[in-house]
Amino acid sequence: MPAERSDALRTSGSSSANGSTRREELLAVATKLFAARGYHGTRMDDVADAVGLNKATVYHYYASKSLILYDVYKSAADFTVGALHDDPTASARETIYHFTRRLLVGIASDIERAAVYFQEGPYISEWFTEEQVAYIRTSETTVYEHVRDVIDRGIASGEFNDCDSHVLALGYIGMTLGAYRWLRPQGRRSAQEIAVEFSTALLRGLIKDETVRRESPLGIDVATTAGSE
């Protein structure tokens, strides 16, 4: 029996848990390679070599390189949308802070995934199906609309000064999601600390009440949230 066929049979006979683990390993390795070399600069052979498998076994888990890239994108998109969840009783400023914190902590935990997402973004229509592109674009729209709506809620309640929520939401997204370029897990400032800095700077420009703006721009005790969620 050829070696590749034998390897594939052993793989297909493994438990679903092992299969899931192997697929996750391939995805993690490919993400690092895509981030370092670019999608075009990475071959399936490179992924196989990095995990110590032959290419036939890699194709058992991923039928094409574009499917690996899509899983990178879907994982990043799902994480970002998942970070939107809010406490309905929270103020607009608290909501923005918590979202910022979850985003930056998540980005710091997987810098390569964020790098791939933005590096390859202009080209995904070439590699993904229409349905896959639509899924990613819908996720991006969901994030934008959520941030815009939170700002609008703050304006409507009198918590925030009047502003162009469309422009501010786009600026906020660029500021936070673009942090992958320089954010480092072991850097001088933690992702949590940077979230406080980002949120404080943004919210002090939005909050209408001078006392709140000066004394409690985040609306919460930062120390009590550092280890939450």
Image (cartoon, rainbow, N blue to C red):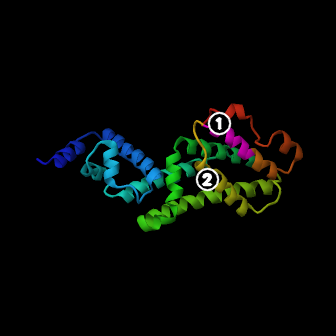
Q: Residue at x 51, y 44 (%)?
A: 110
Element under label 2? Answer: helix
Q: Nearer the viewer, mark 1 or mark 2?
A: 1
Which span is picked out in magenta?
A: 187-199
Q: Quadrant of residue 6?
A: top left
Q: Residue at x 51, y 60 (%)?
A: 136
Q: CA distance from mark 1 to mark 2?
A: 18 Å
Element under label 1? Answer: loop
Earlier-in-chain disc, 1 versus 2: 2
| Residue neighbourhood size for the residue with mark 2, other residues' Cα within 10 Å, grouped as few (<14), some (14–19), many (≥20) | some
The residue beneath circle 2 is 178
Q: Is residue 90 visible?
A: no
Residue 201 coordinates in the image, percent (x, y): 77, 47
* 188 is within the stretch colored magenta: yes
- Say how many tags the image has: 2
* 40 is within the stretch colored magenta: no
Residue type at mark 2 is: Gly
Q: Is residue 15 visible?
A: yes
Residue type at mark 1 is: Arg
Q: Residue at x 75, y 37 (%)?
A: 220
Give the numbered dot on residue 19.
none
Residue 130 coordinates in the image, percent (x, y): 44, 68
Q: Quadrant of residue 126?
A: bottom left
Residue 27 coordinates in the image, percent (x, y): 40, 47
Q: Is residue 182 left or right of residue 209?
A: left
Q: Quadrant of residue 192?
A: top right
Magenta region's main secondary structure? helix
Give the numbered dot on residue 188.
1
